Image (cartoon, rainbow, N blue to C red):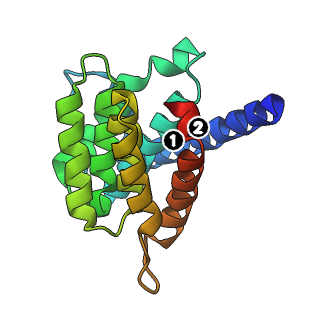
Amino acid sequence: DAKAAQRLRERAARLYRRGRDHALTALELARPGFRQALADPAAPAALRTEQLALAYWGAAAWGGMISLSKDDPETVADLPLAIHLAQLAWRLDPSFGDGNLASLMGSFEMARPGGTRARAEAYFDEALRLGQGRSAGAFVAKAEGIAQPAGDKAAFLDLLNQAVAVTDAPASPLALSNEVMRRRARWLIESADDLF
């Protein structure tokens, strides 16, 4: 149902926008002028440790919003700002989120003009190393970010099957995101013949 799918994409983009806006508002309140510094490459923009999660989630939401708004040039034009926010988090703690930040950096590397596959793959591999097999999202990100664009169906399916096989320890902080990523991995496996 194309109309229903479009409505879901629009709703998801609105939710991503809200998430991004909440994160940026909190960062601005903690450091007035942050948004302006983020937009000015010459201005020093830095984060404190307690702002790391805000920066990660803000950048992730921003990236998600952009990926769902490719027909909106104004939104897509914000990609460098989203990447800059993720880079600030990366400078503070590359291991954040058991590899989730590294996955985000890999996705941004593949999306940015001039980004390289080799550098993106290094980020995705770092995400897998940091996740130690506990993060389904790291496998899905590498499948979609590296294997799919390369047309490597075997690697794509292998990575997705590894994502599906991820099990959660009791009360794992990754449980919810892993469940979402396992569902996405199953859907991608079912859709593989259409994607390749």
Identify which residue is drawn at 65% across, 41% down: 12
Residue 136 screen position, x and y as percent: 41, 61
Q: How crowded is mark 2: few (under 14 residues within 10 Å), some or many (20 or more)?
A: some
Q: Name the residue under label 2.
A: 17
| Residue type highlighted by circle 2 | Arg
- Measured as percent of width and height from the top left, residue 53 is found at 37, 57
Taking the spot 46% from the left edge, 49% from the top edge, the residue there is 26
Q: Is residue 161 left or right of residue 94?
A: right
- Image position, residue 190 (x, y; %): 59, 48
**Picture disc at residue 20:** 1
Pointer 2 and pointer 1: residues touching (CB < 8 Å)? yes
Label 1 is placed on what type of residue?
A: Arg
- Taking depth in this image into account, of 141 and 50 the one nearest to the observer is 141
Secondary element under disc 2, as helix, strand or loop, is helix
The dot on residue 92 is none
Answer with left or right where residue 158 lies relative to residue 128: right
Asked if one can make out residue 116 in the rendered structure from this viewpoint, the answer is: yes
Q: Is residue 38 visible?
A: no
**Vertical relation: 81 (above or below) 153:** above
> Residue at point 43% right, 58% down?
161
Using residue 160 as the reference point, say whether residue 80 is left or right of it. left
Q: Which residue is drawn at 58% across and 58% down?
A: 183
- Quadrant where the N terminus is found in the figure: top right
Q: Which residue is farthest bottom? A: 170
Give the structural element (helix, strand or loop) at label 1. helix
Q: In this view, does 76 lie to the left or right of 95?
A: right
Percent coordinates x, y for residue 27 in the rendering: 40, 46
- Is 124 placed above or below 134 here? above
Label 1 Cα crowd, 10 Å radius (few <14 / some 14-19 / many 20+): many
Q: Which of 136 and 23 is in front in this view?
A: 136
Instruction: Please identify the quarter of the rendering in which residue 138 is found.
Output: bottom left
